[in-house]
Image (cartoon, rainbow, N blue to C red):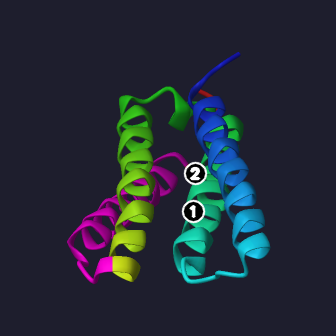
Amino acid sequence: MRGIGFYFFVIGVLCVTIGMFWGIQMSISEDHGLAGAHAHLNLVGWVTMGLFGLYYTVTPSAAASGLAKIHLLIATAGVIVMVPGIVIALKQGGHGMAAAGSMLTAASMLVFLYTVFRNGIGKSA
């Protein structure tokens, strides 16, 4: 079944795939100037999204809530805004987009914190 956990995982796998190719490109070019953005793509995009996906897969009561969909949107927006924002900050010095993405990512984690306290782990719908 393709529930919310599946969608978190798909986004996570897309992030790590892009991150791997980006890392290969940095290695080949010997230019690691964007390593911070690459690291955030892999850690927030892959690890965090993957863990969210696992949680929602093993906790159907949380996955069944409308808040899970909102969480997916906020978390995805956080990665999409933060990573290019870090690139811009590193290359051009403007930090606004990175800050906005970071705030979205933090909001996503607060939603997750609430979700875990509300539903526990492994509870059925």
Q: Number of numbered discs present? A: 2
Residue 101: in magenta span = yes
SS assignment for the magenta stretch, majority: helix
Q: Which residue is mark 1?
A: 41
Q: Are marks 2 and 1 in contact (CB under 8 Å)?
A: no
Residue type at numbered disc 1: Leu
Dividing the image into 4 quarters, which one contains the N terminus?
A: top right
- Where does the image place residue 18, in percent across and percent down from the top left? 66, 51
Residue shown at 26% from the left, 66% from the top: 97
Residue 93: in magenta span = yes
Q: Is residue 9 left or right of residue 106?
A: right
Marker disc for residue 122? none
Rendered view: 40 above or below 78: below
- Where does the image place residue 93, in percent across and percent down from the top left? 27, 83
Part of the protein shown in magenta: 92-119
Quadrant of residue 10 within the rendered picture:
top right
- Where does the image place residue 11, in percent across and percent down from the top left? 59, 40
The crowd level at tag 1 (other Cα within 10 Å; few <14, some 14-19, many 20+) is many
